[in-house]
Amino acid sequence: MASMRRHAALLAQALSLSACATVPDAPTLTGGEPMPAGSVVALRQPVAVGDVVVTPMRVVEDSRCPINARCVWPGRLVVETRVDGAGWRETVPLTLGDPQRVRGWSISLVSGEPGQMAGSEPVRAEEYRLSYEGRLTSSAASSTRR
């Protein structure tokens, strides 16, 4: 009888642990539900980009030429961006207009607002609004079909 109770207790523990399993096909997320693809987002706000979710974490560099100035060099906007896929997470620096390959995806930071005005205060982190695009690269797409 004691042996049967022990087996029943072990079975109950095993079943309760199986309820804690993660879904491997879902992106790893923290920070709330992602905005739909194509949305303009603030820092730390996740957005869906295909089957992955990207979250702009912080502006690393904003050396873009001010809107009301003439510059020899256009400068650049670099945003540390977290990319979440099915069972993985990677953080990469993305430069505006420069696609980056991340685990079979080509991810691009396609817009960053507002631009700096010459003679004004620097843009504050909470003012940034960013948008991203992404596509599965052909080599990754062909490997998923096998």
Image (spheres, grey):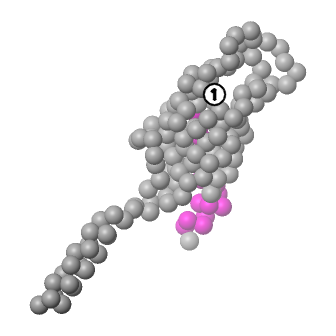
Q: Is residue 17 left or right of residue 98?
A: left
Seen at 55% across and 65% down, the residue is 144
Looking at the image, residue 88 lies above or below residue 68: below
Q: Residue furthest front?
A: 2
Q: Position of residue 113 (x, y in %)?
A: 62, 23
Based on the displayed image, in which of its 4 quarters is residue 119 positioned? top right
Magenta stretch bounds: 131-145
User: Magenta segment: does it hold 71?
Assistant: no
Residue that lies at the very extreme toward the left in this rendered image: 1
- Measured from the top left, where is residue 77 in percent x and y? 71, 31
Residue 99 sits above or below residue 7 on the image: above
Image quadrant in which the C terminus is located: bottom right
User: Does the rendering let one see residue 37?
Assistant: no
Q: Residue at x 36, y 65 (%)?
A: 21
Name the residue: 58% across, 30% down: 130
For the view shown, which residue lies furthest in the right direction? 72
Secondary structure beneath label 1: strand
- In the displayed structure image, the side of residue 63 where residue 39 appears, left or right: left
Residue at point 84%, 18% (across, down): 71
State the residue position of label 1.
112
Question: Viewer-proximal residue, 138 or 82?
Answer: 82
State the count of labels: 1
Is 16 on the left-hand or right-hand side of 61?
A: left
